[in-house]
Image (cartoon, rainbow, N blue to C red):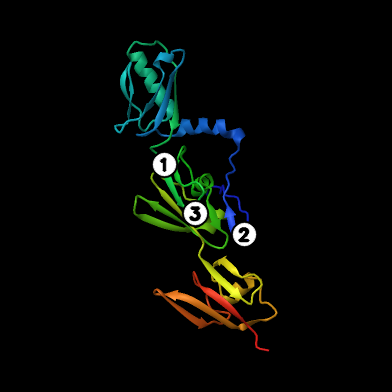
Amino acid sequence: MLLPKIACAMALGAVAVTSTFTPALAGQAAATENRSYQIGPGDILSVMVYRAPDYSSVVEVGADGTIPLGSVGTVRVSGMTAPEAGAEIARRLRAADIFKAPVVNVLVQTYRSRTVSVLGNVTKPGEYPLERGQIGISDVLARAGAVLGAGGGTIELIRNGAEKRTIPAQDVLLGRTDVVLQPSDTLIVNDAATFYISGEVQKGGSYPIEPNLTVGRAIAIAGGLTPRGSAGRVKVTRNENATDRTFKAKSGEPVKPRDLIVVGSRIF
C-alpha cells in the first residue's frame, strides 16, 4: 500500500490536504521523474547536445510519437524514458556522421501525455502529471489541495471514461486505500453530506454526517441540550421526492443528508 501524503488537521470539521514533499528534495525528485517517465504525444522535450548549442532545441512530441530534429529528420521517442530518447538521438547523430561521440541530454519540460484530472472540492483543480510509475490518489490530492470532510465525503475515481469507483475520504486519510492512478483517470472530490440542527442546543449549525448518525448523536455533536431543551420534543424536516416532510423524531432516528433537526423546549 502506498503511504498517504495527506496530513490530517481536525479543525472546523475539515481536513486540509498537504504534501510531505520538501523543497530540498525537489531537484532530486525532478531528475528521478524524468528518468522513469515514459514520453508520449504532447510532451514538451528539451534536447541538449553537449558543446553543440546549434543542435539543441525544445520540441513537442507529435501525435505519431516522433520529434523533429533538423539534422537527422524525425526521431520516434514515444514510450521511451528521457535517457532512452537521449541515447536514440545520439545514435542517430553518429549514424548521420555528424558527431563521433555525441552526449545528448533529454529532459521533459512539460508533461502532457500521462495526466490525471482533479475536480470538485480542491483548491487547485486541473490536470496533474504522472511523472513516475507508482503515483496514488493521496499524492495527487495533496498537490491539488483537496479539502476532505472530517465526518464524511467521498472521492470518485473515473477510469476509461465510464468505470466509476467511490472511495470514502476517510479511507484515504487513514491510509486504508490509495489506488495507483493511470493516465486519463479523473478524481472528483465531494464534500461530506451535512445536516442542520437548531433550537434548544448549545451550538446550532451545519455539521457533516458521520456513519450511522442518529438524532441523539446529532444533538451531542451540537453540544447537547440547553437547560430548556427537551430530548422528547425533537422534529425533523426531511426532503423526500422533492417534498418537505416534518415529523417527530426519537433519539434513535437515523439522520439523512440535508435533514433539519429542531429541538424544542421543555414545558414547565
Vertical order, 78 against 133 (above or below)? above
Residue of label 1: 115
Amino acid type of disc 2?
Leu
- Badge nearest the viewer, 1 or 2: 2
Relative to 115, say whether 88 is above or below: above
Q: Is residue 263 left or right of residue 40?
A: right
Secondary structure of residue under mark 1: strand
Residue positioned 50% across, 51% down in the render: 122
Q: In which image quadrant can residue 173 be found? A: bottom right
Q: State yes or no: discs 1 and 3 in contact (Cβ < 8 Å).
A: no
Q: Give x and y (percent) for residue 170.
A: 54, 58
Q: Position of residue 158 (x, y in %)?
A: 39, 53
Q: Nearer the viewer, residue 176 or 72?
A: 72
Q: Residue at image x 42%, y 30%?
A: 81
For marks 1 and 3, give the one nearer the viewer: 3
- Packing grade of label 3 (10 A; few <14, some 14-19, many >=20) is some
Where residue 25 sits, quadrant-wise, is top right
Task: Estimate the x, y position of residue 176 in percent, counting from the top left.
Answer: 54, 55
- Seen as rendered, the residue at the extreme bottom is 268
Contact (Cβ within 8 Å) of mark 3 with mark 2? no
**Left or right: 43 in relation to 179:** left
Q: Which residue is mark 3?
A: 121
Disc 1 residue type (three-letter)? Thr
Residue drawn at (66%, 72%) of the image = 202
The mark found on residue 12 in the picture is 2
Measure the C-alpha gap from mark 3 to mark 2: 16 Å
In space, the residues marked 1 and 2 are separated at their CA atoms by 33 Å
- Secondary element under disc 3, as helix, strand or loop, is loop
Q: Earlier in the sequence, mark 3 or mark 2?
A: 2
Q: Quadrant of the C terminus?
A: bottom right
In the picture, the disc for residue 90 is: none
**Which amino acid lies under the numbered mark 3 shown in the image of this protein?**
Asn
